[in-house]
Image: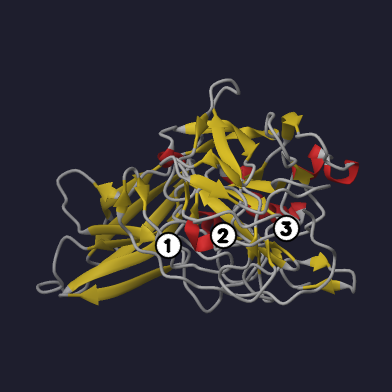
Amino acid sequence: MRPSRFRRPLCACLQAAVLCLDGALLAGPYSAGLNDPGSATDAPIPGFVGPDGQGMARIDDGFGIINDRNYVNPLFFDWANAVTSYAPAPGVAGAWANSSFTLGAVSGDHFDVASLGDLASGGTPGQLTLHFANPIRDLSGADFTVFENAFFQGTGAASLFAEFAYVEVSADGVNFARFPARSLTAAAVGQYGSIDPTDVFNLAGKHVNAFGASWGTPFDLADVGLASVSYVRFVDIPGNGTSLDSLNQPIYDAWVTIGSGGADIEAVGAISRLMTFPAWPGLGALAVADRGPGADPDGDGVSNLLEYAFARLPHLPDAAASPVQVESHADRLEIIFSRDERATDLTYDVQVRDALGSGQWTTIARSVAGQPVAPVASFTPTITETSASAITSVRVSRKVRVADVQAMAGHGSRFLRVLVTQTTVP
């Protein structure tokens, strides 16, 4: 089903998730359909960010441009570039059968979709397979995000209009692995009924991407045991309970719908794409003349190369926040910085010395080509790495803390720094 183009109030339904194992899957409740950054299972990822609010799409809603200060989330390093197959179920209206609408960046427009069709009787569910020119890798946290056009048609948690699809991935376009999924919806909801998104996990279509709100469903390649993939396939789920989740429980959604029935795929954004500075998407917001590694077009005192290294944006000034901080804990200095594990052409050296103006710096810890920061030689600094994102699904941006190997006592002075070196990647 396609929602009509007009404003509708959105329901921000937050639900805490409980982390426990149910077979190979985390037990529910799962994330809410809108902003739910602390969900321990599948916290939704905003398609748009900026001054107008997380997840608020910059879009023409029929009355003019809304959220005009927002922009597509720069977390996404790539988007699907080609359709390799599209076979909707019978009955999809022509307006919803243009598979090219699924390519490129998320738009937040709930008309910018390709429908898979909803089977009214037996047959083959609709399918869509998308290709990525650059492989999606298995890095920390969510590796890609699916945007479908689910929407709330009421004010409670159990008022999400949803049409689900299985998600499958492949490295070669031939052999596909399906993400393990869960559906806890107890009974059929009817032709245009609603579900509670906190009952659903690892199915495309559980997060709102309509009426000005844009949130996507995260998927982690660790769930299917693949190191990298280049294809993402969607298989529609007729929501009458004949399709089963990974524990053989029935899956229910709004069924049967017509015209634009079945899951409506809008975009797929790759998070875990390996990167070098010249191909960094962050440079796309700059004039060509401002894209050099030593340039500082936003005037915040941090060069483009260091903006890249410390997981910042080169076109937005961050004058109030230094990319590196030093603190003292238990009489030891500790240096704190962020890094992006997708950057394969950088080496980070954490170094110490006693005198600021003279003497050699000694490297006590290092990260090479996106790998975690680790001790060097016989040094034993205390190192911690955690996600630098407030959204629990997003973990490619890492917050690093490295404590000095020596206490301050006995030193007239002590200094720490992080040296970033750009390397050549074949």
Is 224 placed left or right of 308 in the picture? left
Between label 1 and label 2, give the one nearer the viewer.
1
Residue position for label 1: 29
| Kind of residue at disc 2 | Ile
The quarter of the displayed image where residue 159 is located: bottom right
Residue position for label 2: 45
The answer to whether residue 116 is visible is yes
Cα separation, mark 3 vs mark 2, equals 25 Å
Please provide percent x and percent y for residue 391: 48, 64
- 3 or 1: tag closer to the N-terminus: 1
The image's mark for residue 286 is 3
Please provide percent x and percent y for residue 130: 68, 34
Neighbourhood count class around disc 3 (C-alpha, 10 Å): few under 14, some 14–19, many 20 upward: some
| Kind of residue at disc 1 | Pro
- 3 or 2: tag closer to the N-terminus: 2
Q: Residue at x 50, y 30 (%)?
A: 177
| Kind of residue at disc 3 | Leu
The quarter of the displayed image where residue 411 is located: bottom left
Please provide percent x and percent y for residue 95: 89, 45
Q: Residue at x 15, y 72 (%)?
A: 408
Residues tagged 3 and 1 counted as in contact (Cβ below 8 A):
no
Q: Residue at x 67, y 54 (%)?
A: 254
Cα separation, mark 1 vs mark 2, equals 18 Å
